[in-house]
Image: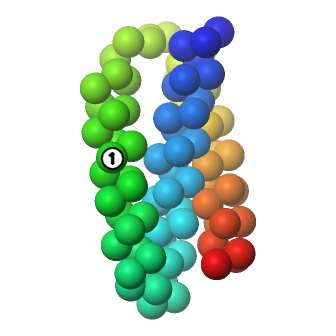
Amino acid sequence: MRALASVWMRGASIVCLVSLNTRLIATGQVWESILVGGMISAVWWLNARSANRVEGWQALVAYSVGASCGTAVGLWIATLI
């Protein structure tokens, strides 16, 4: 269960930052988008190092649901900035 929670969190983190950054770029917030772009790279690098440790359909579902939640959270954060 802990491994699936980790997969969910990675999916949520990456897609949250990408959604946020898309909104920042679209609204011309240059410096903020540069900062978030660096954060995306850091999370992506960490994910690439450990993504192959969990396999199976449960990991697929956990990552996909995490990505969906991350999209919603990223868009919500963008409305606050």
Above or below, 11 against 49 in this view is below
| Secondary structure of residue under mark 1 | helix
Q: Position of residue 78 (x, y in %)?
A: 63, 72
Whether 12 is drawn above or below 52: the answer is below
- Is residue 61 visible in this depiction of the protein? no
| Amino acid type, residue under disc 1 in the picture | Ala
Task: Determine whether, in the image, residue 74 is placed left or right of residue 44.
Answer: right
The quadrant of the picture occupied by the C terminus is bottom right
Vertical side of 51 occupied by 69: above or below: below
- Side (left or right) of 45 relative to 57: left
| Residue that appears at 59% across and 17% down | 4
- Image coordinates of residue 8 in percent, x first then y, are 59, 30
Residue 57: name its quadrant.
Answer: top right
Determine whether, in the image, residue 78 is placed left or right of residue 21: right
Crowd around label 1: few <14 · some 14–19 · many ≥20 (10 Å): few
Residue at 54% over, 13% down: 3
In this rendering, would 3 be left or right of 31?
right
Question: Farthest bottom residue?
Answer: 28
- Count of numbered circles in the view: 1
Measuring 51% from the left and 88% from the top, which residue is drawn there?
27
Q: Which residue is mark 1?
A: 42
How far from the left and from the top, in percent, is residue 31? 38, 81
Which residue lies at the image location 51% right of the left edge and 51% below the top edge? 15
Q: Is residue 12 visible?
A: yes
Residue 62, image x, y percentages: 61, 26
Q: In which quadrant is the N terminus drawn? A: top right
